[in-house]
Image: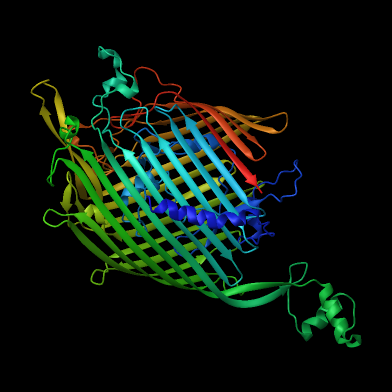
Amino acid sequence: MSKQIPLLIIYIAFLCPFARLRAQMPISPLDDENRSHWAEEDSVEKVDVPVGSYVWTVDRRFGMVRPALPDTLPHAFQNTAFTDGLRGHYNFTGNLGAPRQSRLFTEWQDGMLGSQFIFQRPYDFFITQPDELLFYNTKSPLTNITYHECGNKQNGEDRIRAVYAVNVNRRLGIGFKLDYLYGRGYYANQSTAHFDGTLFGSYIGERYQLHSMYYANHLKNAENGGVEDDAYVTNPESFPTKYSPADMPVNLQKTWNKLNVNTFFLTHRYSLGFTRWRDPEGNVVRRNSGAGGRLMNRIGIRPDSLLRDTAQVAEDSLMLVSEFVPVAGIIHTLRLDHNNRRFLSNFRSNADNRTYFDRYYLPGDSANDFTKNVRVENLLALELREGFNKWVKSGLRLYVRHELESFTLPDERKNVMKFHENYLSLGAQLMKEQGRLFHYNLLGEIRTTGSDWGEFNVEGNADLNFPLLRDTLRLRLDGYVRNEQPSFYFRHFHARNAWWDNSLDHVFRTRVGGLLSWNKTQLAVHVETMQNYTSFAEGLTSATDPETNERRFFHSVGVRQSSKNVQLLSATLRQDFRWGILNWENEFTYQATSDKDICPLPAFTGYTNLYLLFRIAKVLRTEFGADLRYFTEYYAPTYSPVIGQYCLQDPAERVKVGNYPVVNVYVNFHLKHTRFYFMASHVNRSSGGRPFLVPHYPLNEMVIRLGLSWNFFN
């Protein structure tokens, strides 16, 4: 961390001189139909600085530009502060930036492109992956500062983020993002402290395009193992002393998970093609003698009576516009990951720590587990672009990808043990992205270590779009078939309190589904089958304290792979209503699983948001309302501090969470380039009930929150 921050400061100092550059009118890498993604220009305030920008993301394989919405939209700004997501899809341990896991299986992070460094997955609330980063093209330098705050210096939560983007010229854009999150925690030993520094840049030329980024993340999460007794929260009257959240006894002290997640990503392409010309009406024309005669006839001039310079004047009068048409190209994508994790726990002076862990595999009186992962990935692709000729209706890409990974783990006899894995993938993609009625994308790849060709991935999607009653009826189909080995840390893990070297079968998964949307209604249905599903599993050993005669549980964790076929079903309905200034947004998800012990899911998850939308003095956009998050009871995965991951509960001592609504009341404002909100979160918290998203980790009580986001154009 100490080496990373000075490096970021040097980069930022290098970028600062560009802050006063007046960018030229930027060239959009997007189609004209996507111009709606430009940030809205202020029609009231007249200044000399041009205001406006548009944003996009890139595909993580091939660097294809994908239109995106800016993260400065005023609606639901207040919900961006929540670790459980905009609509409450995630379980988490209670504090800002704490580890989380989605309750919806369609949002689980899997796939052959996923990182094997699984310790970063629970922190996807904070870590921005390369295909999630927003690239900017701006009319003038853009700075956005966003701040969320609640509580006080003893228990509050703070997050501040700054984004700066500028166009050096019409084609080259650069920027950086700084993000700092600090959650002190309302319960003991629960603090979080995360820092992210990201540099990014893009170049959009006719023949050559480049997107690059580098991010350095340092994450620190204090572990308390949950409260010792849920009754402190659910039935406080049963104790002679009423505990405040900060005073409730917890299971661990002086225990931390620390992560460093660093990635360099580069994707660039060079296109081969030809130049064609269009007249002011958009018609393709040719610049030769025959075409010139035809064009001059179009404007009423006889070709045989014109001199050479007169013909040139006639042609210029048509204001022909040149257009480069890509035909083929070569793509290169590079990704470098350097990640590590350290688990610290002091046993010497903490009796609670000694009675929490069940197994000990390394000597010493404290845990200081360290693992490191280094990954180098290169992808080279050849593509044939669609649309360069009226007969070419599809595009094609052929690619080869090489991955080299190394892992470092503790060892009993040696200081460390190193593992190396080498993968070669061959793949092809067939797609149709142009047009408005029908699109499709089909990709297939196989991966091998040189001796095992058993891993493969076939995925695809298609959509149909029909105009219907001043809107578009859209049907989207998607699915995949995958056979892949579990991530490295399911197969190998060495630490003081957990140890395994497993030989696991490949996980076979098949998913099919679709989305039907029209106007303000969306219905998504997905069905999935999994064989050899692999997960972490908690182990509990009970014992009675001879002094207090209290029952205690010692905790361990391992890997569980089931050979059963597990079927999953998900159906999500989104329905919005509007009557004048009254707005009502709804999302309801039904899920079913054929084996609740292997893959537990809540049967129902819901989100509803009722608010008034109006303007004060015709300029202050105001949303005033309340939202509610809810899911039915189920044996939710518990959290293991030993590995920093979610795992199945021990069947001998399981508890259910859910059937508890969380209500937030808010007022959200937007004025010109500024957004701000005030919120009372969890206003329905009172004695009783089970305010848990994760077993033994209670939610915060009612909290007053505020947030501010300000855009600067200079």
Residue, x 15% and y 28% (percent of image)? Answer: 552
Q: Residue at x 59, y 77 (%)?
A: 273
Residue 12: percent from the left, percent from the top?
Answer: 52, 54
Whether residue 105 is visible, yes or no, is no
Q: Is residue 122 above or below residue 396?
A: above
* Above or below: residue 83 compared with residue 201: above
Rendered image quadrant of residue 338: bottom left
**Is residue 698 rendered to the left or right of residue 267?**
left
Instruction: Tell which of 289 and 57 is nearer to you.
Output: 57
User: Residue 129 versus residue 467: which sits nearer the camera?
Assistant: 129
Task: Tell me which residue sits at (85%, 77%) in the image.
Answer: 314
Quick check: 656 above or below 563? above
Q: Is residue 398 above or below residue 411?
A: below
Q: Is residue 361 left or right of residue 632?
A: left
Q: Position of residue 92 (x, y in %)?
A: 36, 36
- The answer to whether residue 592 shows anywhere in this view is yes
Image label count = 0
